[in-house]
Image (cartoon, rainbow, N blue to C red):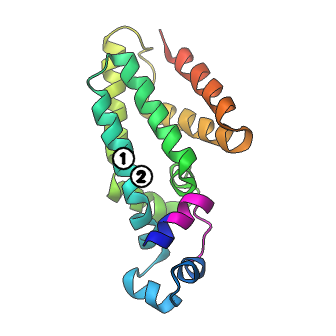
């Protein structure tokens, strides 16, 4: 599992089961006995990063509403930039099976936390009231793409532009 997690983090969802087996020093049959499908392997590899994003977002509840939104947004972008497989999965690059697996391991919780954070910020009067969690997730994916293509500093600028644009 350690080999799979490291490979998906570094190279994204395009990593093959054979690549994972080779990195783990086992045959593909051994991997297959533990994980019936590549989707199950991806699900296991993405569980920890998703749990960390959710935990960080939950801790942000203690902040004032807009600071909490900033923390939630930054945590999603940073986690997906650091873990290419998570970024691929959030962007829907793994297909419907990976999307379904993501929901099983916590993507629905990410949306729940994001919804809660958006509602708090809108009620405070600091956030536009016509923003949806889907829109914010799409903007986070765009910032992840900027990070991959242009680096951390460009991503930070993009995140700042996005978050300023969400203000009322």
Q: Position of residue 128 (x, y in %)?
A: 45, 14
Residue 113: say if magenta: no
In-front residue for pair 74/127: 74
Which circle marks residue 151 in the picture?
A: none
Q: Residue furthest right?
A: 150
Residue at image coords 45%, 84% = 31
Direction from residue 1 to residue 60 in the image, left or right: left
User: Which stretch is magenta?
Assistant: 6-16
Asked if the residues shown at circle 2 and circle 1 are in contact, with their CB atoms under 8 angstroms apart, the answer is yes
Q: Which residue is mark 1?
A: 52
Q: Position of residue 75 (x, y in %)?
A: 45, 36
Residue at image coords 52%, 64% = 6
Direction from residue 105 to residue 17 in the image, left or right: right
Residue 12: say if magenta: yes
Which circle marks residue 49 in the picture?
A: 2
**Is the N terminus in the top left, top right, bottom left or bottom right quadrant?**
bottom left
Q: Position of residue 104 (x, y in %)?
A: 33, 59
Residue at image coords 44%, 89% = 30
In-front residue for pair 46/119: 46
Label 2 – label 1 distance at C-alpha:
5 Å
- Secondary element under disc 1, as helix, strand or loop, is helix
């Amino acid at each position: 599992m350690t080999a799979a997690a490291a490979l998906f983090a570094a190279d994204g969802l395009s990593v093959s089961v054979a690549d994972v087996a080779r990195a783990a020093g086992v045959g593909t049959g051994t991997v297959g006995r533990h994980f019936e499908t590549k989707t199950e392997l991806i699900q296991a590899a993405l569980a920890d990063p998703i749990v960390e994003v959710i935990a960080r977002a939950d801790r942000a509840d203690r902040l004032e509403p807009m600071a909490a939104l900033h923390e939630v947004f930054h945590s999603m972008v940073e986690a997906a930039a650091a873990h290419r497989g998570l970024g691929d999965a959030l962007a829907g690059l793994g297909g419907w099976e990976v999307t379904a697996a993501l929901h099983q391991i916590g993507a629905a919780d990410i949306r729940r936390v994001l919804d809660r954070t958006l509602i708090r910020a809108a009620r405070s009067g600091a956030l536009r009231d016509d923003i949806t969690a889907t829109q914010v997730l799409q903007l986070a994916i765009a910032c992840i793409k900027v990070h991959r293509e242009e680096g951390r500093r460009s991503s930070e600028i993009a995140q700042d532009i996005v978050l300023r644009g969400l203000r009322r």
